[in-house]
């Protein structure tokens, strides 16, 4: 893996001229660092995969009685993934003894096969009434929709029989070639469904006073176990097209001005677990009972059932304005929004022996502003546009399941969720430097967490009681950005067009865990070259001694700036002349070259500043795989 390669020292050899690849790196990394080249050289090209995917949709429309239309739509997305994997016999050199060639694993070849199919279908049935009379215009829609998602996964594996080595030949990589007595198998299957009934009204008076309202009733199979599968959602919106008023029509530089506001509720039932409320069983320890003795397999709950699990609901309102100026070349838009999420769906810590389950944890609030600006124009054969958008976010947990309750998450228990704080904020000790000498230690608050020496991190006495204790832990970072933004630019000349899309964020922190090694023999990041190694040498990087566990505690030392700016997409295209194409029965032909993730400017030491996670534990850098730069060349052909 990339992490293994980074941790390996670059100053020692991975290969012995006489005996081949080392099993672990020789010299000072021996026994602590597996040779990363074993994976690269001896496990390469041992997998074959075939992935197929097809999607399509059909629809039918029927207009009747002048003002009515009925539309039926059906879409399907089907994917089939098949894979075969070969396990070779891997022999490497163990330098603990001259000429000692060892075999990794059980010394047997093996094969495995897996097949996964997933189907998604959606159907929509919509009846629409449209009418205009006098100064009034009305569109009303009623409908019924369904969504179905099903997944099946089968896997099997076998090892070689006695003396029957499975050949390293992809044509032989099927489980039928292995020893039936070594067979193992597994399967996963689940299905989810959602049914919705909906209605929507759009009304305007004189083309300037606007109203919209909607209602929908959604039912999800995810909550069928608890009886809470149905939930109602509403929305209403108002708009005033001020520029259509008679007293504003003489303003030549103003083309459109609209004030708008809306309120509504939304639902969320997207969960990682297919059956989040039901107590699924998984294999556990077996036991022997009876006479004669017999082995009885054991099972345990994967996570605790939740008999009250229900929809997550978001109540949102916003007010704003948008306007066009200078013959619609300049567009401005601004919105203030406030969203309150109730019955937040997230993982809750499980009891001993179980994995986290799903629960409705409480409510959170997000509020801020959204701004957008765009300018576009044409000069002769040239056309161009440039625009940007910016969103501010202020996040706070309003309440949890009970007062004083907190949720601790993350591999290092660094992510906390507590009422009055941002969701998933980082919790630990504030750092005010590195102890330089014993006199500084003697004159500082006593550290009761561990015995400290010069070179250790110096924690802040937050509560001011003269001691460093667990009570001094506090908020040390927020993974939610204060601002997200985007910039786009496009230019065209005759048949050529160039587009650039950029984005970024600022004001968030990242918690770094991937360099917190347990062995001092590992290769460290380059900033550790500036570690403390004597009085006055560093006031930010502690000494390099992993026995000093005080420096491994959650603290600001592991907090990094998560702000970044990225050139996300660049595309150059050429559109062939339509007159020439029409002679061969082609409507349009475009050739294009595209680059994704061209360049990222960032502050964190990891490979990427964009990190996933869960609803209550995110922004943690566990050594995420680098984001690739993707080059694409293609064409779009329309007949």
Image: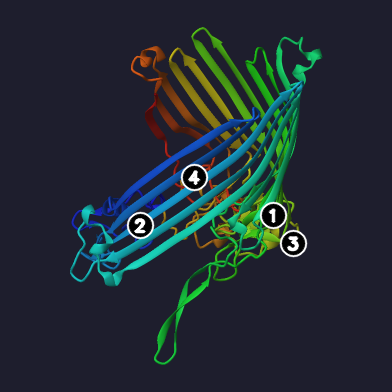
Mark 4 lies on residue: 606
Mark 3 falls on what kind of element? loop
Can you see residue 536?
A: no
Residue drawn at x 64%, y 23% as measured from the top left:
373
Mark 3 lies on residue: 402
Mark 1 lies on residue: 343
Q: From the top left corner, tell me how far across and down residue 78 is, in percent.
A: 43, 46
Residue in the foreground of this view, choosing between 379 and 147: 147
Mark 2 lies on residue: 114
Front of the two marks 4 and 3: 3
> How far apart in space, not on screen, are marks 1 and 4 (Cα)?
34 Å
> How far apart in space, not on screen, are marks 1 and 3 (Cα)?
13 Å
Give the crowd class for mark 2: few <14, some 14-19, many >=20 residues within 10 Å: some
Front of the two marks 4 and 2: 2
Q: From the top left corner, tell me how far across and down residue 173 is, in percent.
A: 25, 57
Residue in the foreground of this view, choosing between 117 and 639: 639
- N-terminal of the two: label 4 or label 3? 3
């Amino acid at each position: 893996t990339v992490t293994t390669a980074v941790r390996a020292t670059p100053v020692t050899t991975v290969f012995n001229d006489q005996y081949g690849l080392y099993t672990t790196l020789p010299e000072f990394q021996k026994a602590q660092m597996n040779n990363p080249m074993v994976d690269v050289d001896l496990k390469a090209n041992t997998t074959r995969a075939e992935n197929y995917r097809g999607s399509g949709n059909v629809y039918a429309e029927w207009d009747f009685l002048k003002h009515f239309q009925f539309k039926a739509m059906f879409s399907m997305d089907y994917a089939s993934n098949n894979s075969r994997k070969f396990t070779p016999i891997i022999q490497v050199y163990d330098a603990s003894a001259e000429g000692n060639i060892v075999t990794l694993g059980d010394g047997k070849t093996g094969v495995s096969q897996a097949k996964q199919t997933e189907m998604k279908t959606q159907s929509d049935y919509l009846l629409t009434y449209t009418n205009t009379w006098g100064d009034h215009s009305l569109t009303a829609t009623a409908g019924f929709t369904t969504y179905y998602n099903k997944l099946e996964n089968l896997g099997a594996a076998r090892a070689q029989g006695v003396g029957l080595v499975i050949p390293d030949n992809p044509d032989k990589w099927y489980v039928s070639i292995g020893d039936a007595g070594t067979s193992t198998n597994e399967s996963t299957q689940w299905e989810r469904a959602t049914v919705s009934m909906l209605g929507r009204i759009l009304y305007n008076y004189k083309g300037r006073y606007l109203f919209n309202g909607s209602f929908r009733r959604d039912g999800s199979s995810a909550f069928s176990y608890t009886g809470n599968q149905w939930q109602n959602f509403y929305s209403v919106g108002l708009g005033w097209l001020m520029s259509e008023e008679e007293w504003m029509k003489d303003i030549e530089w103003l083309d459109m001005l609209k004030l708008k506001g809306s309120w509504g509720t939304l639902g969320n039932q997207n969960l990682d677990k297919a059956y989040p409320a039901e107590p699924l069983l998984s294999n556990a320890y077996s036991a022997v009972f009876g006479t004669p003795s017999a082995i009885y397999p054991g099972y345990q709950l994967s996570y605790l059932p939740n008999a009250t699990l229900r929809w997550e609901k978001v109540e949102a309102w916003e007010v704003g304005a948008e306007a066009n100026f200078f013959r619609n070349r300049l567009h401005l838009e601004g919105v203030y929004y406030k969203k309150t999420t109730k019955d937040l769906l997230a993982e809750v810590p499980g009891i001993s022996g179980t994995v986290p389950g799903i629960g409705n944890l409480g409510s959170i609030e997000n509020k801020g502003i959204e701004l957008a600006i765009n300018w576009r124009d044409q000069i002769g054969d040239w056309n161009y546009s440039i625009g940007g958008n910016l969103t501010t976010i202020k996040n706070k947990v309003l309440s949890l399941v009970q007062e004083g309750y907190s949720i601790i998450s993350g591999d290092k228990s660094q992510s906390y969720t507590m009422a009055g704080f941002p969701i998933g904020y980082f919790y630990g000790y504030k750092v005010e430097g590195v102890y330089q000498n014993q006199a500084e230690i003697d004159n500082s608050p006593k550290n009761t967490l561990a015995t400290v020496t010069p070179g250790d991190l110096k924690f802040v006495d937050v509560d001011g009681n003269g001691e460093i204790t667990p009570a001094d832990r506090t908020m040390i970072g927020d993974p939610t950005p204060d601002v997200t933004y985007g910039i786009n630019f496009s230019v065209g000349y005759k048949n050529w067009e160039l587009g650039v899309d950029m984005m970024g964020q600022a004001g968030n922190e990242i918690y770094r865990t991937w360099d917190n090694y347990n062995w001092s023999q590992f290769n460290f990041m380059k900033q550790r070259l500036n570690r403390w190694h004597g009085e006055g040498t560093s006031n930010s990087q502690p000494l390099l001694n992993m026995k000093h566990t005080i420096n491994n505690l959650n603290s600001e030392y592991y907090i990094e700036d998560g702000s970044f700016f990225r050139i996300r997409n660049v595309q150059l295209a050429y559109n062939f002349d339509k007159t020439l194409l029409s002679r061969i029965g082609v409507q349009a032909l475009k050739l294009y070259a595209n680059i994704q993730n061209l360049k990222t400017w960032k502050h964190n030491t990891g490979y990427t500043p964009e990190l996933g996670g869960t609803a209550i534990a995110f922004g943690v850098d566990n050594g995420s795989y680098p984001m690739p730069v993707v080059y694409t060349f293609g064409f779009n052909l329309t007949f």
